[in-house]
Image (cartoon, rainbow, N blue to C red):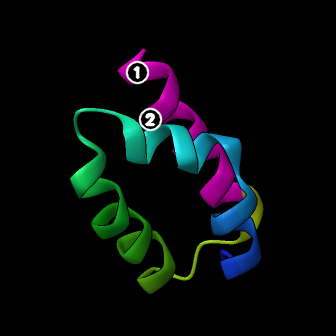
Amino acid sequence: MISDAYLTRSRVVRGLRDDPFGEHIDLYIEELQRRGNSLEIGHRYLSLAWDFGF
């Protein structure tokens, strides 16, 4: 599961929250957690979102 510590310390998550679509990132993270994604998979998906946004 994606940990709260990861979400507060992650450069990727902070950057995504500052992105124009940042208001939606928390909903996306909630969906990843609801699906039971591991930290590794969650990080991979969030990194892809970061790459797509920039």
Number of numbered markers: 2
Instruction: Please give the name of the residue rendered at 62% of the width and 41% of the height, measured from the top-left corner.
Output: 12
For the question of whether residue 27 can be seen, the reply is yes
Q: Where is residue 49 in the image (x, y as percent from the top left)?
A: 44, 35
The residue labelled by disc 2 is: 49
Residue 1 visible, this orientation: no
State whether residue 6 is above or below residue 10: below
Confirm whether the magenta stretch covers residue 6: no
Residue 34 as seen in the image, left or right of residue 48: left
Disc 1 marks a residue whose amino acid type is Phe
- From mark 2 to mark 1, how far is it between C-alphas? 5 Å
Q: Where is residue 5 in the image (x, y as percent from the top left)?
A: 75, 75
Q: What residue type is labelled 2?
A: Ala
Numbered disc 1: secondary structure: helix
Residue at mark 1: 52
Q: Which residue occupies 76% across, 58% down? A: 40
Label 1 crowd (10 A; few <14 / some 14-19 / many >=20): few
Q: What secondary structure characterizes most of the magenta part?
A: helix
Which residues lie in the magenta part? 41-54
Residue 34, given in percent of the width and then of the height, sits at 42, 85
In the depicted structure, whether residue 3 falls above or below residue 47: below
Label 2 with label 1: CB-CB less than 8 Å:
yes
* Residue 8: quadrant of the picture: bottom right
